[in-house]
């Protein structure tokens, strides 16, 4: 089973979010996002947001992007014809490229409205808070990645804030707080 989610930023009403295909639950992607926040100053987070270039998943990668992205994928997926869809599918940690200075993120904000979007991590630069949301199939307690049409529940598409933490001082017990 894959646990899909979103990771991104919000600043001045603009959202920049990308897809995470695997392990988006708090003890997976959540831990990586918290580490990223703890190791990145507010100034740098703001600069990152301003410098991020959003790309469409159908857009062709440049040779430079292909070479750079090989750092973030298992070697089995390296090839000269790498595409953004493969990048999305096999990158477990979307914070890693940003931390390294790779400024491209695949635009996936529309995934917010999907039942399969189980977890959402937003670095809100306006409030200087990390927001953690439960969503979709996770919210209604469906354990497997089944066809969400079977469980269409419009309330499940309204994310529930399960944790909000100051970016400059995320508590050590943040994970326990999110699980409650």
Image (cartoon, rainbow, N blue to C red):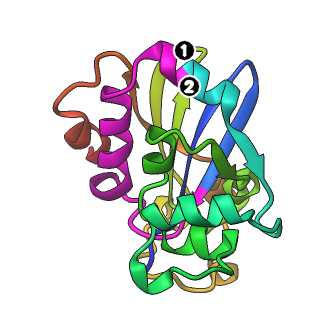
Between 26 and 104, the residue placed more toward the observer is: 104
Residue 161 location (% of width, % of height): 49, 37
Q: Secondary structure at mark 2?
A: strand
Residue 13 location (% of width, % of height): 76, 24
As drawn, 94 above or below 43: below
| Residue identified by numbered label 2 | 124
* Quadrant occupied by the C terminus: top left
Say if residue 146 shows up in the picture: yes
Residue 127's tag is 1
As drawn, 31 above or below 125: below
Residue occupying image coordinates x 76% and y 65%: 57
Magenta residues, as a range? Answer: 19-45
Q: How many badges with numbers are in the image?
A: 2
Residue occupying image coordinates x 60% and y 34%: 9
Q: Overall secondary structure of the magenta stretch?
A: helix
Residue 109 location (% of width, % of height): 72, 50
Residue 65's tag is none
Residue occupying image coordinates x 27% and y 55%: 27
Residue occupying image coordinates x 67% and y 37%: 52
* Label 1 with label 2: CB-CB less than 8 Å: yes
- In the picture provided, is 65 more to the left or to the right than 122? right
**Residue 27: in magenta span:** yes
């Amino acid at each position: 089973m894959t646990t899909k989610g979103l990771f991104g930023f919000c600043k001045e009403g603009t959202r920049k979010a990308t897809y995470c295909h695997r392990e988006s639950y708090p003890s997976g992607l959540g831990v990586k996002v918290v580490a990223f926040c703890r190791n990145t100053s507010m100034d740098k987070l703001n600069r990152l947001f301003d410098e991020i270039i959003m790309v469409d998943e159908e857009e062709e990668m440049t040779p430079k992007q292909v070479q750079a992205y090989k750092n973030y994928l298992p070697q089995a997926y390296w090839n000269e014809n790498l595409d953004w869809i493969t990048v999305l599918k096999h990158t477990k940690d979307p914070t890693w490229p940003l931390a390294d200075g790779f400024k491209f993120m695949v635009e996936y904000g529309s995934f917010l409205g999907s039942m399969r979007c189980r977890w959402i991590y937003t670095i809100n630069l306006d409030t200087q808070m990390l927001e953690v949301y439960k969503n979709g199939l996770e919210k209604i307690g469906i354990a497997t990645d089944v066809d969400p049409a079977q469980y269409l529940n419009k309330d499940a598409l309204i994310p529930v804030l399960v944790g909000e933490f100051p970016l400059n001082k995320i508590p050590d017990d943040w994970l326990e707080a999110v699980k409650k």
